[in-house]
Image (cartoon, rainbow, N blue to C red):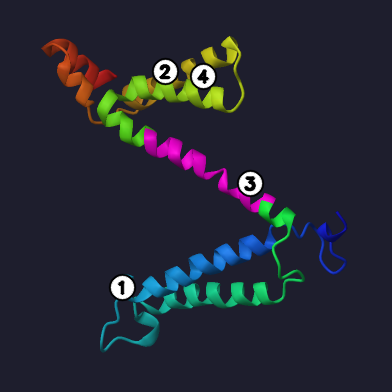
Amino acid sequence: MNDDIGESARGPKRGQLPFAVGFLAVSAVLAALLWDQTAWKDGKDLFSQARFWPAVGVFGMVGFTALHLWHLPRKRFARPDRIEGRNWLFVLEFVGWFLAYVWLVPLIGYLPVTLAFAAALTWRMGYRSPKMLGISLLFGLAVVVLFKGFLQVRIPGAALYELLPGTLRNFFILYL
């Protein structure tokens, strides 16, 4: 693509416009929320105010992003911009995986969910051989043993564990 590399700047131009527009939108939202999220105390020095430095940072983000957007050589979305922006949205899939993991651990349990997600993410990333799935299950088991056994991280027991008989339930809550 001829318009992908500029003469005045090194590197690709694709994706700069969606990045600048998205960053300006996020910065503007942060600027709008600044007054709700920070406080101004009467009688304090300007530089000691809790709102001052966050305002400097957020309004700097808005201003410098607007300047960047204004100085972009291409002001219209082209096909490479749309493709690049779509590629950036693919990372949100993994946010969904993480949220599902966090939601399922208190319901099903740390060990079973960790093993299931390790295997599922390995499969999702394209490593579908039995060897790679076995390695992912061993990794999941090692994570649980490390966190619950050696580091003694207290992870709440699952709601599913409440259905087990007394001593087995205690074992699952403490170690799995």
- Image quarter in which the N terminus is found: bottom right
Q: Position of residue 114 (x, y in %)?
A: 40, 24
- Which dot marks residue 81? none
State yes or no: residue 112 in magenta.
Answer: no
First-in-chain label (1 vs 3): 1
Quadrant containing the C terminus in the rendered view: top left
Say what secondary structure mark 2 lies in.
helix
Tell me the residue at 55%/43% (across/down): 91
Pick the front one: 13 or 151: 13
Tell me the crowding category of disc 4: few under 14, some 14 to 19, or many 20 or more residues within 10 angstroms, Cα based.
many
User: On the image, numbered disc 2 is attached to which residue?
Assistant: 141
In the image, residue 51 lies at what x, y percent? Answer: 36, 77
Label 1, label 3: how far apart the Cα atoms are = 33 Å
Lateral position of residue 102 relative to residue 124, left or right: left
Residue position for label 3: 87
Query: At numbered mark 1, what does the secondary structure look like: helix, strand or loop?
Result: helix
- Cα gap from disc 1 to disc 2, whole angstroms: 44 Å
Q: Amino acid at mark 1?
A: Asp
**Region rendered in magenta:** 83-100
Task: Calculate the distance from the C-alpha at mark 2 to the C-alpha at mark 4.
Answer: 9 Å
